[in-house]
Image (cartoon, rainbow, N blue to C red):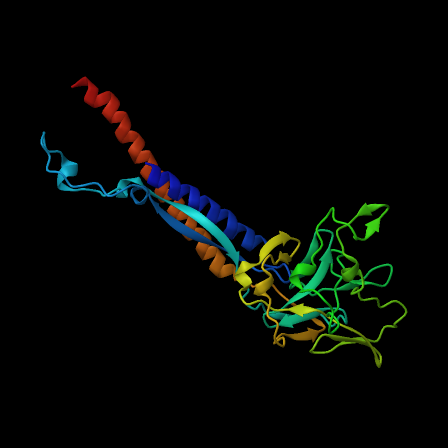
């Protein structure tokens, strides 16, 4: 019974994840989530028991030992995001950039440094270059700047943070120094393949594009943002990502594939429900019918 219950619970979580992927099939820069399942065997937590010859009446399980397989079940061990490249869509907007490669744009949030593939940028009222959610986009660190990229993230409540109305917003002075300001730079803003921003012939800044050794270690924090908690996961070599101005990266969700996964997960869920129903009927007959004999 518990094997069927655990399978139904795991498939229910799988259905929710697939449904979320389908809901974001048209969200720019969205990366679909995938589950990982783990089979659990209760017998693995016990010491091996000696196989004794039955001294009493022989039962069916003596002929067919299950070795704890009747106490096995499955769980959702975790989830990870697939960073498969999405298609590039032309927008002709000078502040839209699509990332062609494994990199992510570094942005500053009240919770610290985050990374995103959503390259639909805009200008804030004060002229700062920000994401569609209003988070400032960061420029590349100048050569010789102390501190590793990942360890520069500020934690709320620490000293030296930027404040608004006397309230700490979680951005370090180092991040504030890397904000990109395009006020009074005119409409001729160009971004080349390396992420360098020019206003006419004037060089403004270079977008900070970060690549990771294992992107599956990144964790979603909402609003198309990812968090990196492992400083050694950052690639220190020359970035391979190419930026395409006037384009955005679409979602990497394949609706047909996700619909197939949704149908499969629903059928497996129904199968487990039928198994649970069958066990319930058997237990009912055992308690009612056999008791009458």
* Residue 233: % across, % down: 57, 64
Which residue shows up at 39% across the image and 41% down it?
A: 6
Q: Quadrant of residue 195?
A: bottom right
Image side of residue 108 versus residue 281, left or right: right
* Residue 17: % across, % down: 51, 50
Q: Quadrant of the C terminus?
A: top left
Image side of residue 57 versus residue 159, left or right: left
Q: In the displayed structure, would residue 264 be above or below residue 197?
A: above
Q: Residue furthest bottom?
A: 201
Please indicate, yes or no, whether residue 71 appears anywhere in the rendered image: yes
Q: Quadrant of residue 192?
A: bottom right
85 or 112, nearer to the observer:
112
Image side of residue 134 versus residue 250, left or right: right
Please indicate, yes or no, whether residue 90 appears anywhere in the rendered image: no
224 or 269, nearer to the observer:
224
Q: Residue furthest top?
A: 292
Which residue shows up at 20% across the image and 19% down it?
A: 291
């Amino acid at each position: 019974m518990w094997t069927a219950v655990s399978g139904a619970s795991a498939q229910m979580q799988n259905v929710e994840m697939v449904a979320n992927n389908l809901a974001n099939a048209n969200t720019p820069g969205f990366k679909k989530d995938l589950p990982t399942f783990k089979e659990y065997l209760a017998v693995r937590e016990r010491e091996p028991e000696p196989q004794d010859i039955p001294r009493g009446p022989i039962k069916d399980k003596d002929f067919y030992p299950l070795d704890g397989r009747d106490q096995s079940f499955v769980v959702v061990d975790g989830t990870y995001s697939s960073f498969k490249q999405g298609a590039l869509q032309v927008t002709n907007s000078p502040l839209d950039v699509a990332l062609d490669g494994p990199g992510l744009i570094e942005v500053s949030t009240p919770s610290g440094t985050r990374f995103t593939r959503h390259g639909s940028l805009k200008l804030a009222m004060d002229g700062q270059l920000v994401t569609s959610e209003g988070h400032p986009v960061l420029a590349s660190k100048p050569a010789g700047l102390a501190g590793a990229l990942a360890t520069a993230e500020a934690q709320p409540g620490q000293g030296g943070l930027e404040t608004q109305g006397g309230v700490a917003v979680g951005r370090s002075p180092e991040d504030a120094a890397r904000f990109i300001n395009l006020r009074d730079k005119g409409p001729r803003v160009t971004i080349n393949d390396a992420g360098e921003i020019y206003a006419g012939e004037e060089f403004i800044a270079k977008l900070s594009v970060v690549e990771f050794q294992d992107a599956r270690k990144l964790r979603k924090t909402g609003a198309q943002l990812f968090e990196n908690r492992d400083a050694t996961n950052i690639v220190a070599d020359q970035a391979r990502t190419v930026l395409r101005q006037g384009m955005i990266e679409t979602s990497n969700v394949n609706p047909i594939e996700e619909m197939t996964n949704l149908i499969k997960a629903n059928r497996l869920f129904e199968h487990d429900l039928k198994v649970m129903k069958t066990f319930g009927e058997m237990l009912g007959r055992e308690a009612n019918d056999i008791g009458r004999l």
